[in-house]
Amino acid sequence: MVFSRPPAYPPGNILFRLDGIAYELARDLGPGSHGERIVLAIQRGKGQADLGRVLIKMLALPTLTEATKEARQRLVEEAQLATYLNHRNIARVHGLHESRKVLHVIMEAVSGRSLEGLLNLAQGRERYFSENFMLHIGAQVAGALAHAHGCRDETGQPLHIVHRAVDPTRIRVKLSGKAKLTDFGLASAHLPGRRSVRVPRARGDAYYTSPEALLGAREDARSDLFVLGLVLLEFATGRHLLNPPDLLPRELLRRVPENERGRIGDAIARAQDAWSEADMGELVLRAATFTPDDVARAAEELSAPVRALFSKLLRRAPSERYATAAEVESRMRKLLHAREDYGQAEAAEELHQALVDAGETLAADAEPGTGRMLLPDSVSTEPASP
C-alpha cells in the first residue's frame, strides 16, 4: 500500500490547481485497489466559488519502486480506457494531473446512493424495492455494460473490455432515478499498443465474481452479466446465490464428482491467493456446484417473468447465459414496458419514499436548522448553498 498512513493533506487544503480551478480536499474516502487513496474534492473557482464535487484517486510517487510503477501504469491505463467510455450510465473520468509528486485521476462524483446502501436501507425497513425499480436500475447498468463491451479503438478493433467488479458499491442511483456504473479501475481490456491490460492480483469483491473467475477460467463479457445477475437478485430478494445460509461445506463437497475434486482443490488454492476472504473454499465450492434449482429457490418470491430472467442470467456455463448485455437490457426494458413503462420519474418517487420511510430528511424537505441525515455512502456533487 502506497499510503500507509492518512495523506499529508488535511481537509481544506488545496491538492492542486488546474485550468483556473483549485481542487480542495473535502473528505478522505479510503484506499483504492492499487495503493492509491480516494478522496472527495471541492472544485473552487474565482473568489472561492464552489463549482461542485469530484472524486480523485491520489497516488504518491516519492520513489518509483516496482509497486508504484505498477500502480502508476494501472491508473494511467484506467484514464486511457475511460476515453472510450462515453455513455450516460457510466461515470466519467475527466483526466490525469501530476502535482507535488502525486498522480491524480479526476473522476465524476455521482451523487445519490450506492446499490449497497439502498439494499441496507431496504433491509432496515424490512421491505425491498419493487421489481420494477430493480429492472429499471438493471436495464441502465446493462446498457452501460453493452456500451463498454462493444467499444472499439480508432482502427475499429474491439477492446474486449470486461469490468470485472460489478458489485453493489459500484452502481450508484441518483435521487432522479438515474443509475450509473462507476470505476473501471479493475477492468481488463486490449488497449491500442498493448496486448492486454490487467493486474491479476487486483480483484474485486470475491462475493461478486463469476464462477469462471473463481474457478480460474477465462473471463469475458458474459462474466459481467453473471455478476450483474448476482447483484440484482440480492437487491430484489436479499439472497446471495454464492453465499447461502443453509448449505454446509460438506454438503457442497458431496455435489462434486470424485474425478473433479482435484481440479476444485487447485481452484480453491488459487482463489485463496487472489482474495483475502476467510471462506474462499466454501465460495469456490458453491460456484462450482450451484444448480438452476438453487437459482429458482433464491428467486421464488419474484414474478414468473423475472424468475425466467434470473434463470438465464445465473447459469454456471457462460454459453448458457444471455449472449450480450444489449440482450439483457432489451429483455428488462420489455418487462418494464409490459408493466406500463415504469421509468425514471416512478423510480425517483419510489426512492424518495424509501428514504423518507427510513427516516432520512432530503435537502428539499429539511426544516431550517435541522441539518440533513445522510447514509454513509451518500455524495453531494452540487455546490454548497450560499
Image: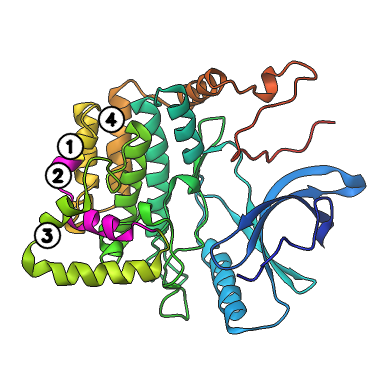
Closer to the camera in the image, 229 or 60: 60
**Residue 309, percent across and down?**
23, 38
Q: What element does badge 3 sit on?
A: loop
**Residue 133, percent across and down?**
40, 28
Q: Earlier in the sequence, mark 3 or mark 1?
A: 3
Q: Which dot marks residue 296?
A: 1
Extreme-top residue of the structure: 367
* Quadrant the N terminus occupies: bottom right
Q: What element does badge 4 sit on?
A: helix
Q: Are marks 1 and 2 in contact (CB under 8 Å)?
A: yes
State whether residue 329 is above or below residue 83: above
For label 1, the crowd category at 10 Å Cα-Cα, with few meaning under 14, some 14 to 19 and many 20 or more, is some
Q: What element does badge 2 sit on?
A: helix
Given the image, on which type of amino acid does mark 1 rest?
A: Ala
Q: Are marks 4 and 2 in contact (CB under 8 Å)?
A: no
Q: Which dot marks residue 256?
A: 3
For label 3, the crowd category at 10 Å Cα-Cα, with few meaning under 14, some 14 to 19 and many 20 or more, is some
